[in-house]
Amino acid sequence: MAQLKVTQTKSAIGGKQNQRETLRTLGLNRIGQSVVREDRAEVRGMITTVAHLVTVEEVD
């Protein structure tokens, strides 16, 4: 299955509570941190919620 590399590029300060919680659920705590997650519907939904705070790359 495909993998997605998610990198936090902006701060969650001033954002909504659900956006801060979504970043934490993805495993992101600070700007510049990256995590690799499976490309699943649940993860895509979380990325959509915080799309303005992260960048996404597809990894093999």
Image (cartoon, grey):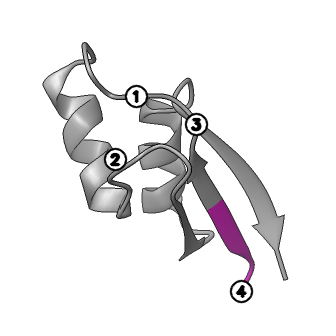
> Along the polypeptide, which appears first: circle 2 or circle 4?
4
Question: In front of the other: label 3 or label 2?
Answer: 3
- Of the residues shown, which amino acid type is indicated by label 2? Leu
The residue that disc 3 covers is: 9
Number of the label disc, if any, that sits on residue 1: 4
Label 1, label 2: how far apart the Cα atoms are: 10 Å
Closest to the observer, 35 or 32? 32
Secondary structure of the residue carrying numbered label 4: loop
Residue 41 against residue 35 in the figure, above or below:
above
The residue that disc 2 covers is: 23
- Of the residues shown, which amino acid type is indicated by label 1? Ser
Closest to the observer, 60 or 53? 53
Q: Which residues are magenta?
A: 1-5
Q: Residue at x 27, y 58 (%)?
A: 25
Number of the label disc, if any, that sits on residue 11: 1
Secondary structure of the residue carrying numbered label 1: loop
Secondary structure of the residue carrying numbered label 2: helix
Q: Residue at x 70, y 50 (%)?
A: 56
Closest to the observer, 48 or 26? 26
Question: In front of the other: label 1 or label 2?
Answer: 1
- Percent across and percent down for residue 17 are 14, 27
